[in-house]
Amino acid sequence: MRDVFGDDRGRIEHALAVLGHANDIRSVEGGDPLVIQAAAVLHDIGIREAERKHGSAAGRYQEMEGPPIAERILRNRHLDEGRLRHVCRIIANHHSARDIDTLEFRVIWDADGLVNLDEVFRENPEVDRESRIRRIFKTSTGRETALRLFTGS
């Protein structure tokens, strides 16, 4: 992660926060811990390449650029082919949720959402928090955690 993000503490801290939430959600919901941990740490790994190639960190560019980088990293770690492909599919869909709906994907989606919602709600205080949370979260644990953190329920 540091090889790709360098000294960008914000992006490293984001990945570690997503990892923490993903582990918490997985402890209740289940899922393959290796896939979840790898995807949590690597989900935004394409940001720098997206900025370099496309001049933007937009989600669609991260989804394009992240999987090849993650694949190189995971092959060096000798992750088996099935898990490697699963992690790459999660990364390739972590902004759009287009082509995947596995338990591991839902855990990562919700963990990333928990980290990102804080910023969303700070920038848009008028947003109906409960409605938004109920609409976007994919696991009951993620939804309950978000409601507790952001609405006090």
Image (spheres, helix red, strand yellow):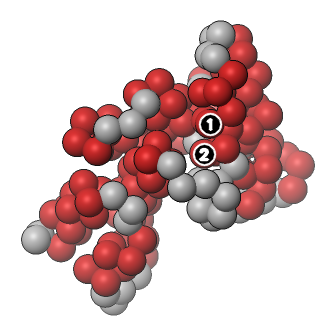
Q: Locate residue 6, reporting x and y percent.
A: 64, 27
In the displayed structure image, the side of residue 109 where residue 7 appears, left or right: right
Residue contact at pointers 1 and 2, CB within 8 angstroms: yes
Whole-percent x, y for residue 19 in the image? 40, 36
In this view of the protein, which residue sits in the foreground, 136 or 18? 136
Q: Which residue is mark 2?
A: 90
Q: Is residue 48 above or below residue 34?
A: below
Q: Which residue is mark 1?
A: 86
Q: Amino acid at mark 2?
A: Ile
Mark toward the viewer: 1 or 2: 1
Secondary structure beneath dot 2 equals helix
- Say which element carries label 1: helix
Identify the residue at image location x=61%, y=35%. 87
Q: Note whether residue 112 is visible.
A: no
Is residue 80 rendered to the left or right of residue 118?
A: right
Q: Quadrant of the N terminus?
A: top right
The one nearer the camera, 29 or 135, is 29
Give residue 45's position: percent from left, percent from top: 66, 38
Tell me, yes or no, if residue 92 can be seen here. Answer: yes
Choose top left, top right, bottom left or bottom right for residue 135. Answer: bottom left
> Does residue 127 sit above or below 96 in this rendering?
below
Q: As displayed, is residue 108 above or below residue 150?
A: above
Q: Nearer the viewer, residue 40 or 121?
A: 40
- The quarter of the image holding the C terminus is bottom left
Q: Residues within 10 Å of mark 1 (few under 14, many from 20)?
A: some
- The residue under the point 11% across, 69% down is 152
Identified by mark 1, the residue type is: His
Q: Residue at x 39, y 62 (%)?
A: 138
Q: CA distance from mark 1 to mark 2?
A: 6 Å
Q: Position of residue 12 (x, y in %)?
A: 51, 35
Give the residue displayed 31% in from the left and 75% down from the top.
Answer: 134
